[in-house]
């Protein structure tokens, strides 16, 4: 086992790699029609949010209030926020069902008291206004995405009353609660449809606000990303809608677990064995020499999971590139070293590219932007995860390696 | 006046501007940030390969910010610097968080310099200003810190003020560089690829600084005062733009361009273009480039009714930079509605493609000539085939307005 020095101590600096954003908090905040977002902060922060929204075609409901350093220091930004909220509420007013104020680090540091402004606006326009504090400074107690899930519950609560519940008593749909819009061909949809669940309400796929309200009409919720766990819990507590959590996985045992959870929760028989056999058949067709190729993995949060999944399948993981290591990942690291005692684990801030150049040049396949950056001679695999309850992601990754 | 913006994004920030200057220099770039501030650079603003730059961002948490993280930053930065032994200098950039909490960057720089022996340069960016002030300050600071008097070389010209954020891909400058090199000039683009410390130090050898963006003006003024290098600020858009610039260089250096101009720029510009005398044109973009495009429309195409606008906020440093009389005809708008309104009734609009969506509402007959402004739209349209300098620029504009 070999660590580059100081690996665990140094998570303080992160190297910048080119990134294409996807399913960021702003995109989730903007995913429900009728819910507008007011970004408040320095223009440098708003700029990133604008392009993330643009990428998903969501700019129509994203409003930016650029704050200067002087405004921030003098507290003028609070008055400006009030004016901005009034502008939004007056803008095609019927279409604005709620506003989420999206604050940046600088506002969080200032401890700006926007509660009064929010209360005045809510009273005047009779529509909910909620505050989302996000960013690295707010992660300690609850992740910003989870906090956003709570805000959606509060907004839903404001609109759904007893009369609406009575009117919509027909519980037949399955709610899909996650952060990305799933492909119509994804395995989860296929499994649900095979088992007769034809009516699906997807959180990220609503075209009207009333469809969001109809979440209370669900018979069951499938949570595909932990961001939506709070929403599922709220629906269970308030409307008696049970839920299960099946996130995207790469490792065989985790995929099997997904099938089991889904099967038990929906009370149907799902054929994991058949899906597993199909995947094995695909794997058997892979030429043996591919398994001898040296692979480097480095693609952010799921690096160890993906490296572990490939190692389990018999691929040779030679190098792993990470910014830092969490305590929960240590088990996987040990597993990787057991599979290949010569594997190298690189902490990116510790890498002296010149020192390791010859090692990097021996890598045959580099998966993810971090590995690609250092292993310039290797075949480049820019893997992008999409949601898959079963073998979709690992099958796709193996295909990309080939 | 509306307080919010919806259709048009803010410009790249000051620290993106500084990064764009440092990007191809041999520097280890460190952002003092909770972690998210580098996203604007990696997701939007930087169009070059990430293999050529070494940018790191700290990952401050709430406790770091409240209790102060200067010592932790120094300890970890020493370790980082040791792992990057080949760099010429270290750059530390501020972000909104450091601006609000008040970080003693000078102390950080002093300690890092003492402990590593490498020069450490602090850029006091705050994320509240635009890339304009970032690039301006960065160039000036690099000049003040590193340039020394190295005597003069008669054939050396510096091109100052380049950044992808204001000029786009460096390939746009190829025609200009070819023209200068054809007469034996040694051209250094500053900042440019593969510029190491020894070249920065030698920049004062130049006999002329050609400033291609107002962001290079501070450094040019400094070099004029300190090293007696004269400068001229001009971007040679179209045929006439190039001829005027080459004549001006000829006047200043004594090196004749007459035969070159005759060979390369004798294009029949007197063709009557299909533009009525009352054709109204709006140029919306980087002010110096817009002014130069306006001049090109007038001289190369005979179009007189040209308006120029930008939504760069003329406050603090930007106000100073654009106080030059050259920009007296530029409208600086601070309200999104004003930007939208100024597009109404135009026959031709030359602007970043992001604006196209706005004019589509009611402007179907308007000819739209895309001129990406990376400082606005980032890498979204960076690869679009467009030109503006010299013959290439003339042909590009002509392809839109001459059927």
Image (cartoon, grey):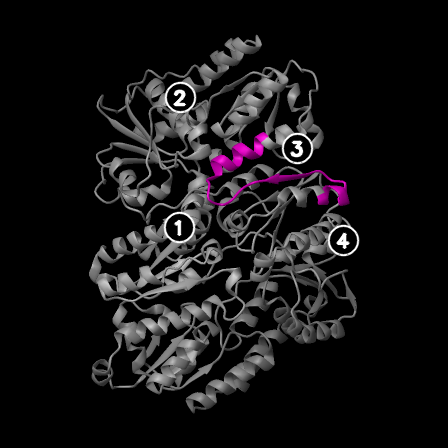
State the separation of the CA atoms marked 3 and 4. 25 Å
Residue identified by numbered label 4: A356
**Residue B351, percent across and down?**
36, 36
Q: Residues within 10 Å of mark 4 (few under 14, many from 20)?
A: few
Which numbered circle lies on residue A75?
Answer: 1
* Residue A182 quadrant: bottom left
| B117 up-or-down from B225: above or below | below
Report if residue A103 lies within the magenta region. Answer: no
Tags 1 and 2 touching, CB below 8 Å:
no
| A235 up-or-down from A342: above or below | below
**Residue shown at 24% from the left, 65% from the top:** A123
Give the camera-side residue of B18 and A290. B18
| A215 up-or-down from A16: above or below | below
Please state which of the two labelled residues, at mark 3 or mark 2, is closer to the viewer.
Answer: 2
Q: Give the range drawn in magenta.
A: B111-140
State the separation of the CA atoms marked 1 and 4. 51 Å
Quarter of the image containing the N terminus of chain A? bottom right
| B116 up-or-down from B283: above or below | below
Q: In this view, does B196 lie to the left or right of B131?
A: right
State the separation of the CA atoms marked 3 and 2. 31 Å
Give the camera-side residue of B276 and B199. B199
**Residue A355, percent across and down?**
78, 51
Parent chain of label 4 = A
Residue identified by numbered label 3: B195
């Amino acid at each position: 086992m070999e660590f580059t020095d100081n690996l665990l101590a140094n998570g303080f600096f992160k190297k910048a790699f080119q990134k294409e954003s996807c399913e960021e908090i702003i995109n989730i905040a903007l995913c429900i029609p009728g819910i507008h977002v007011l970004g408040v902060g320095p223009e440098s922060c708003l700029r990133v949010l604008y392009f993330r929204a643009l990428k998903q075609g969501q700019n129509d409901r994203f409003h930016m209030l650029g704050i200067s350093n002087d405004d921030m220091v003098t507290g003028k930004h609070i008055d400006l926020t009030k004016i901005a909220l009034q502008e939004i509420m007056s803008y095609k007013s019927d279409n604005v069902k709620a506003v989420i104020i999206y604050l940046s680090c600088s506002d969080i540091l200032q401890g700006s008291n926007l509660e009064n402004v929010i209360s005045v606006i809510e009273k005047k326009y009779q529509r909910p206004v909620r505050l989302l504090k996000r960013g690295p400074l707010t992660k300690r107690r609850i992740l910003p995405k989870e906090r956003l899930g709570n805000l959606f519950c509060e907004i839903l609560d404001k609109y759904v009353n007893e009369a609406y519940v009575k009117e919509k008593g027909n519980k037949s749909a399955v709610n899909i609660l996650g952060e990305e819009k799933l492909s119509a061909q994804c395995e989860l949809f296929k499994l649900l449809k095979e088992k007769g669940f034809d009516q699906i309400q997807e959180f990220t796929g609503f075209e009207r606000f009333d469809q969001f309200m109809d979440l209370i009409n669900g018979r069951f919720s499938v949570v595909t990303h932990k961001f939506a766990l709070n929403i599922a819990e709220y629906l269970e507590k308030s409307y008696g809608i049970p839920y299960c959590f099946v996130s995207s996985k790469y490792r065989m045992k985790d995929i099997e677990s997904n099938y089991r959870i889904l099967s038990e929760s929906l009370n149907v028989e799902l054929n994991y064995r058949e899906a597993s056999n199909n995947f094995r058949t695909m794997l058997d067709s892979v030429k043996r020499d591919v398994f001898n190729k040296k692979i480097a993995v480095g693609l952010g949060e799921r690096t160890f999971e993906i490296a572990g999944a490939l190692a389990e399948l018999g691929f040779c993981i030679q190098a792993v590139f990470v910014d830092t290591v969490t305590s929960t990942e240590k088990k996987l690291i040990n597993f990787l070293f057991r599979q290949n005692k010569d594997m190298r684990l690189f902490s990116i801030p510790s890498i002296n590219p010149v020192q390791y150049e010859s090692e990097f040049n021996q890598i045959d396949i580099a998966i993810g932007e971090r590995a690609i950056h250092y292993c310039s001679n290797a075949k480049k695999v820019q893997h992008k995860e999409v949601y898959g309850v079963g073998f979709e992601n690992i099958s796709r990754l193996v295909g990309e390696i080939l | 006046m509306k307080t919010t913006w919806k259709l048009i994004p803010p410009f790249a920030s000051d620290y993106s501007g500084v990064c764009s200057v440092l990007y191809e220099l041999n520097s280890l770039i460190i952002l003092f940030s909770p972690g998210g501030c580098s996203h604007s650079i990696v997701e939007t603003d930087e169009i070059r390969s990430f293999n050529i730059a070494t940018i790191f961002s700290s990952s401050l948490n709430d406790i770091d910010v409240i209790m102060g993280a200067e010592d932790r930053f120094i300890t970890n930065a020493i370790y980082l610097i040791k792992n990057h032994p080949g760099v010429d200098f270290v750059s530390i950039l501020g972000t909104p968080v450091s601006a609000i909490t008040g970080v003693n960057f000078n102390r950080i720089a002093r300690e890092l310099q003492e402990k590593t022996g490498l020069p450490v340069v602090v850029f006091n960016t705050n994320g509240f200003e635009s890339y304009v002030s970032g690039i301006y300050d960065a160039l000036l600071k690099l000049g003040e810190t590193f340039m020394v008097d190295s005597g003069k070389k008669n054939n050396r010209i510096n091109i100052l003020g380049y950044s992808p954020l204001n000029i786009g891909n460096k390939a746009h400058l190829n025609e200009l560089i070819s023209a200068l090199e054809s007469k034996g000039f040694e051209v250094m683009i500053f900042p440019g690829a593969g510029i190491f410390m020894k070249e920065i130090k030698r920049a004062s050898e130049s006999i002329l600084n050609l400033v291609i963006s107002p962001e290079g003006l501070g450094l040019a003024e400094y070099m004029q005062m300190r090293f007696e290098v004269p400068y001229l600020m001009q971007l040679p858009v179209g045929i006439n733009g190039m001829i005027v610039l080459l004549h001006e260089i000829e006047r200043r250096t004594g090196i004749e361009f007459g035969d070159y101009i005759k060979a390369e720029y004798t294009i029949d510009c007197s063709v009557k273009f299909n533009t009525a005398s009352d054709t109204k044109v709006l140029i919306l973009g980087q002010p110096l480039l817009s002014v130069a495009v306006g001049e090109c429309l007038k001289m190369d195409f005979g179009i007189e009714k040209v308006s120029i606008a930008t939504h760069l906020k003329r406050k603090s440093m930007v106000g100073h930079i654009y106080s030059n009389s050259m920009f007296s005809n530029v409208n600086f708008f601070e309200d999104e509605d004003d930007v939208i309104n100024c597009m109404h009734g135009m026959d031709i609009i030359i602007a970043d493609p992001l604006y196209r969506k706005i004019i589509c509402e009611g402007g179907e007959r308007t000819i739209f000539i895309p001129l990406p402004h990376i400082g606005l739209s980032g890498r979204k349209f960076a690869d679009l085939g467009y030109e503006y300098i010299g013959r290439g620029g003339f042909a590009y504009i002509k392809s839109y307005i001459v059927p």
